[in-house]
Image (spheres, rainbow, N blue to C red):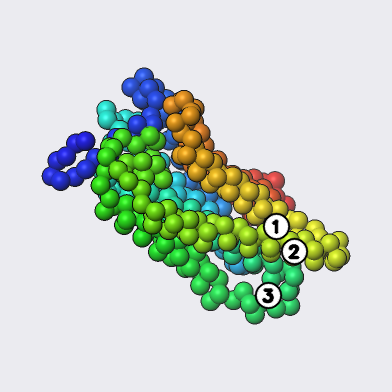
Amino acid sequence: MDDEFNVTFVTLGGHVDVDKYRYIYFIIIFMVYILIICSNSTIVYLIWIHQNLHEPMYIFIAAVLLNSVLLSTVIYPKLLIDFLSEKQIISYSACLFQYFMFYSLGGSEFLLLATMAYDRYVSICKPLQYPTIMRKTTVSIFLILAWLLPASQVALPTGLIANKKLCSFTLKGVFCNNTVYELQCVVSSEQIIYDMVILLNIALLPVLFIIFTYTRILIISYRSSREVRKKAAQTCLPHLLVLINFSCLCAYDVITVRLESDFPKTVHLIMTLQIVIYHPLFNPIMYGLKMKEISKQLKRLFFPAKII
């Protein structure tokens, strides 16, 4: 532990051969980060400037993409700094802030996907009531709650962790996720219980709600005309694929932390980075290529000469 001016530092021990491959690591992660920002921001920009995309579905898509950029920004700049540094360290307070932002924005992702599922449910199952239910005020409330609820819930365990005595100052990872618990001398039962409640509130319940809404959509679509089925497939399939991808990566995060001692260091580094690489790149691909109106605007932006 380095202790200067009462600041506790934690060593990020998950890096592999940084001295040997620092510039290769830096270039790869830098390119990925730029690609994440550009791809997500391009679609958000298109939704912003085109009036026909100012519908709740596209607003929620823009919020999900913005959330991906924020989540990446919590992780990537620090990674890039570490690759060029002699020591891969972080102050304990900054580590807790990264932990807080990582899980807060992760919870927001689930809630945003749940609001998108509700929007599709109302649009397909209650089309006549859609303008009344999904008003601008409703959309704004959903967006605010999607970011505030996870932040308010993750704040408490972050505060509990901050007040715990540390017996280790080496984190077995490259960023601060729930491996911070391994720094503590003792993990209390109240921490475990509260973490389970948070997991239920901002992950499991939204997923169950999404499954319920899409099951209802599937039943209604099956009983309806071919046009309704086509509309349901075009708008719901990308959301479902994003949900499955994100849910698997979140489960992956829990599994790698719990079983990290069973993995070689290099394998664990690769598996950890996949969590923060796949999803931010997967979102713009799914929404950019599979959503008809967004895909059309992308073609107009990049291939204007081919659009008649």
Whichever of labels 3 and 1 marks the residue nearer the N terminus, that label is 3
Quarter in which the N terminus is drawn? top left
Q: Residue at x 49, y 35 (%)?
A: 259
Q: Given this view, does label 3 or label 2 mark the residue nearer the observer? A: 2
- Residue 162 relative to residue 23: left or right: left
Which is more toward the observer, 139 or 221? 221
Whole-angstrom CA distance, mark 3 to mark 2, is 14 Å
Residue 217's label in the rendered image is: 2
* Residue 296: percent from left, percent from top: 68, 53
Tell me, yes or no, whether the two marked residues, 3 and 2, touch with CB atoms within 8 Å: no
| Residue picked out by circle 3 | 130
Q: Which residue is drawn at 85% across and 66% down?
A: 224
- Residue 173 relative to residue 51: left or right: left
Amino acid, disc 3: Tyr
Q: Residue furthest left?
A: 5
- SS at badge 2: helix
- Residue 179 relative to residue 67: left or right: left
| Residue picked out by circle 1 | 236
Q: Which residue is drawn at 34% across and 37% down?
A: 171
- SS at badge 3: helix
**Residue count near mark 2 (Cα–Cα under 10 Å), binned few <14, some 14–19, many ≥20:** many
* Residue 210: percent from left, percent from top: 64, 60
Amino acid, disc 1: Cys
Whole-angstrom CA distance, mark 3 to mark 1, is 16 Å
